């Protein structure tokens, strides 16, 4: 079972190395930017509260029960319902879009080193996975809050921990992209000095 999973991951990694080019990475970036500006920001307005310190729990680096309750208490039933939909649909789709974009960029940058770095190009999907777990947790506590005005401490902890891990993965992805850019520039300069 484990070998079939690793075989599937290896094939996915090889697929992205083979198919990712500068053009596909730029197209993925354009799709990400368009979705962010035209869809996600519009959907976020449905639960926005003027002068609120937290626009969405997922933008925080972890959050406790007090922050969750404060977030819900300043919103109406309709706004919390919109927030649930946002997490279950729009933010989950956002994860797929940014995940593919980051995988494309990492694959482009690390393609010459793919034999050495292996499946590192799939690292952004770790961020997506924990983003989804955060979305499930946040949606669950929001639904419970609407039902009885309380939130489960264990579900809140799962959502918060998933959020923190998501941001840790994001930092790792940015680090890999930065290292990839430096490696490609160094490789280009080395090639130029030889000719």
Image (cartoon, rainbow, N blue to C red):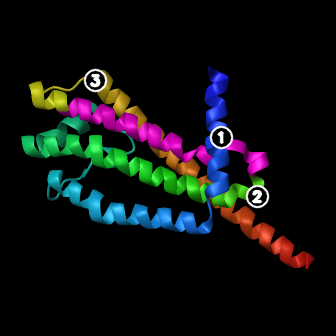
Placement of 181 over or under 87, stated as above or below: below
Q: Residue 20's mark?
A: none
Q: Quadrant of the C terminus?
A: bottom right
Name which quarter of the figure residue 75 lies in: top left
Cα separation, mark 3 vs mark 1, equals: 39 Å
Q: Nearer the viewer, residue 110 or 23?
A: 23
The residue identified by callout 3 is 153
User: Compared with residue 62, is residue 111 higher up or lower down, i.e. above or below?
Assistant: below
Q: CA distance from mark 1 to mark 2?
A: 17 Å
Judge from the rendering whether residue 181 lies leftward or rightward of residue 96; answer left or right. right
- The residue located at (73%, 70%) in the rendering is 185
Helix, strand or loop at label 3? It is helix
Q: Main secondary structure of the magenta part?
A: helix
When the figure is inspected, residue 59 is found, relative to residue 27, above or below; the finding is: above
Q: Earlier in the sequence, mark 2 or mark 3?
A: 2
Q: Which residues are magenta?
A: 114-142
Classify 10 Å Cα crowding around label 1: few (below 14), some (14-19), many (20 and above). few
| Nearest to the observer: residue 148 or residue 27 | 27
The label on residue 11 is 1
Identify the residue shown where x is 19% and y is 54%. Answer: 52
Residue at 78%, 47% (x, y): give it.
115
Rendered image quadrant of residue 23: bottom right
């Amino acid at each position: 079972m484990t070998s079939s999973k690793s075989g599937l991951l290896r094939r996915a990694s090889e697929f992205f190395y083979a198919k990712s080019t500068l053009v596909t990475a730029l197209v993925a970036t354009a799709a990400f930017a368009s979705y962010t500006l035209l869809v996600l920001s519009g959907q976020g307005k449905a639960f926005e509260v003027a002068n609120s310190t937290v626009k969405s729990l997922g933008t925080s680096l972890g959050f406790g029960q007090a922050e969750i309750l404060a977030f819900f208490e300043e919103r109406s039933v309709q706004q919390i319902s919109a927030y649930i939909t946002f997490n279950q649909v729009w933010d989950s789709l956002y994860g797929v879009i940014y995940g593919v974009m980051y995988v494309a960029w990492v694959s482009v940058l690390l393609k010459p080193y793919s034999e050495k770095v292996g499946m590192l190009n799939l690292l952004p999907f770790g961020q997506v996975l924990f983003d989804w777990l955060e979305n499930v947790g946040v949606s669950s506590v929001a639904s419970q809050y609407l039902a009885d005005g309380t939130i489960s401490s264990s579900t809140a902890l799962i959502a918060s921990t998933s959020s923190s891990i998501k941001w840790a993965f994001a930092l790792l992805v940015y680090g890999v992209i930065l290292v990839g850019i430096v490696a490609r520039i160094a490789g280009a300069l080395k090639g130029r000095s030889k000719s």
